[in-house]
Amino acid sequence: TDSGFDPRVLTQADRAAMTKLITGQSIAGAQALDVSAAYETSRDVQLLYLKRLVAEVDAEIAAGHDESWWQTYFSKNILYFQSNYIRRLPKMNIVVAGTQFPDFAVVTSDGYLDIIEIKKPGTVLLREDTSRHNFYWSMDIAKAISQVENYIDNIVKMADAICVKLHNEQGIDFKIIKPRGIIIAGKASDFAGNSKQADDFRRLNEGLKNVRILPYDELSQGLKNTIVSIEQLSQANQDKTKGKLASKSPKKSSS
């Protein structure tokens, strides 16, 4: 928009409150909202938090935590790492003999379901076939892919029961149509200096159906890109404001 408004810097509560205000549902007698000031404050808070989160996750990646630690960490912070995630779901405890469901799932901004599988940053992503000079998925990643594919199959089969259960018990509404599986594991920096390995990782990743391997450092880089985007937008707005003020200032008459 002309104002440069970026909804990514607003929380869900912010958006809900602004929606109520705009649609006339605000509390009677409440003062009018200064949208510009509210946006700038929210942006500054968001930038502060994102910068702290980037520094934190980069330090934790190097700390060598186990999978359970990372599962707890992401259960608290996953919504900040992906701007299109709006809610983390509780475990889908649908009682069906022999059926497994993931511990970690999220609802996307367009109302669909993603499955998250957490592995360690130190997980090896690829192994090398030295006889053919190609790379293939490591055993840990191959097992994770198989597990997530099984989760997706089970969820699709039980889609109606899952949606009804979470609607009735949690008031959560979403759709289950071709859920995506995201496996957070390893580091892309392990491919540094080996373009063949990096290229094979991309080929293998793109060849997966409904599953994606997301290295930890790519997750961190996504946060850094968001910070840069917000800062650039902020600077552009400031430059635009200065330009408008300069154009409105009275011109000195020449003597």
Image (spheres, rainbow, N blue to C red):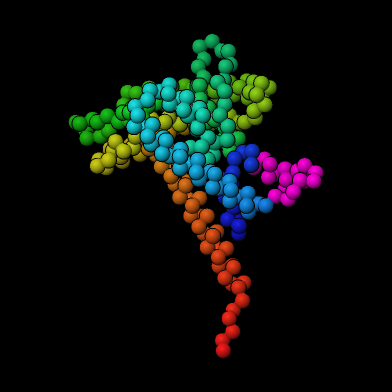
Does the magenta segment cover residue 32?
yes
Which residue occupies the foreground of this view, 193 or 94?
A: 193
Toward the front, the furthest residue is: 255
Of 31 and 73, the residue lying toward us:
31
* Left or right: residue 154 compared with residue 165: left
Q: Residue at x 62, y 72 (%)?
A: 248
Q: Position of residue 77 (x, y in %)?
A: 50, 32
Residue extending furthest toward the top: 97
Quadrant for the N terminus, please: bottom right
Residue 142 seen in the figure:
no
Is 103 located above or below residue 78 in the figure? above
Q: Is residue 165 left or right of residue 68?
A: right
On screen, 251 above or below 114?
below
Indicate yes or no whether the magenta region holds residue 180: no
Tell me the quadrant of the picture where the C terminus can be found. Answer: bottom right
The span picked out in magenta is 15-33
Q: Is residue 51 above or below residue 73?
A: below
Question: Count of labels shown?
Answer: 0
Q: Is residue 21 visible?
A: yes
The residue lying at 50 percent from left, 17 percent from top is 100
Q: Residue at x 58, y 38 (%)?
A: 109
Residue, x 42% and y 23% (percent of image)? 69
Instruction: Estimate the x, y position of residue 49 in percent, counting from the top left.
Output: 50, 40
Residue 247's image quarter? bottom right
Task: Estimate the x, y position of residue 234 in percent, counting from the top left.
Answer: 52, 55
